Amino acid sequence: QKESWSRFGDFRSNVSNGVYRMESAPLTKRIASPVSAKDIGPIGEGIKRKVGRDIEPDYMVKNPESGVYMPIYVDKPPGKGPFPAVIFVPGGTGTGSETPGAKILKEVVIRGMVAVRIDLDGRGKAVGTEDFGGKIHQAGVSAVIEHTAKLSFVKKSYVGVVSMSYGVTAATG
């Protein structure tokens, strides 16, 4: 089967036979040297991040539209940075704490970027009302973008957003 490539930033994604891979783009410089998957862990720890309801958030970010504090989960490469950051907005009614794409998150961190996941209002560990990507969720994503850009280990001008499926409604608001 033919491989299809799409370029974004300094990396390109490859989807072939339903398998997603992220690789360095050959025509651009690398942002950071790759690290081993065993080095990836939550902030200040050298252990692998778990995915599931039992993990604790790294930060709580207030949604200006609803007043709800949304849990965010941050994984970063080793070192002080600053690193580019990618904010993952879950699709459908998914949560950041139970993101099914943990392998993609790990690849992002291996490539030298910070991976940020969100529990939007009414999802996961966030209280509030499910907004199905409406103005409340859109305001929440904006607040997480602003918060992420202020983190000391994030390169402020290199913060991106990736959404999955219907998550695009919250991500593009």
Image (tube, rainbow, N blue to C red):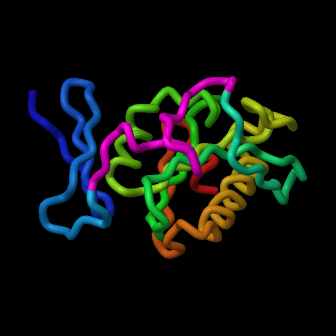
Task: Provide residue 11's location: percent of width, then percent of height.
Answer: 27, 56
Q: Is residue 140 visible?
A: yes
Whether residue 98 is situated above or below residue 5 in the rendered picture: above
Q: Residue at x 68, y 63 (%)?
A: 147
Q: Residue at x 26, y 28 (%)?
A: 19
Say whether residue 41 is left or right of residue 63.
Answer: left
Magenta residues? 34-54
* Magenta segment, prevailing SS (helix, strand or loop): loop
Question: Which residue occupies the extreme left position in the image?
Answer: 1
Q: Nearer the viewer, residue 36 or 2?
A: 36
Count of marks placed on residues: 0
Q: Residue at x 75, y 52 (%)?
A: 135
Task: Provide residue 114's location: percent of width, then percent of height.
Answer: 48, 55
Q: Quadrant of the C terminus?
A: bottom right
Whether residue 120 is situated above or below residue 142 in the rendered picture: above
Task: Provide residue 39's location: percent of width, then percent of height.
Answer: 40, 43
Say whether residue 9 is left or right of residue 172.
Answer: left
Q: Quadrant of residue 28?
A: bottom left
Say whether residue 145 is left or right of residue 64.
Answer: left
Q: Residue at x 78, y 40 (%)?
A: 121
Q: Nearer the viewer, residue 88 or 167?
A: 88
Q: Quadrant of the N terminus?
A: top left
Residue 93 colored in magenta in the image: no
Question: Which residue occupies the extreme right position in the image?
Answer: 67
Say whether residue 36 is left or right of residue 122.
Answer: left
Q: Is residue 168 visible?
A: no
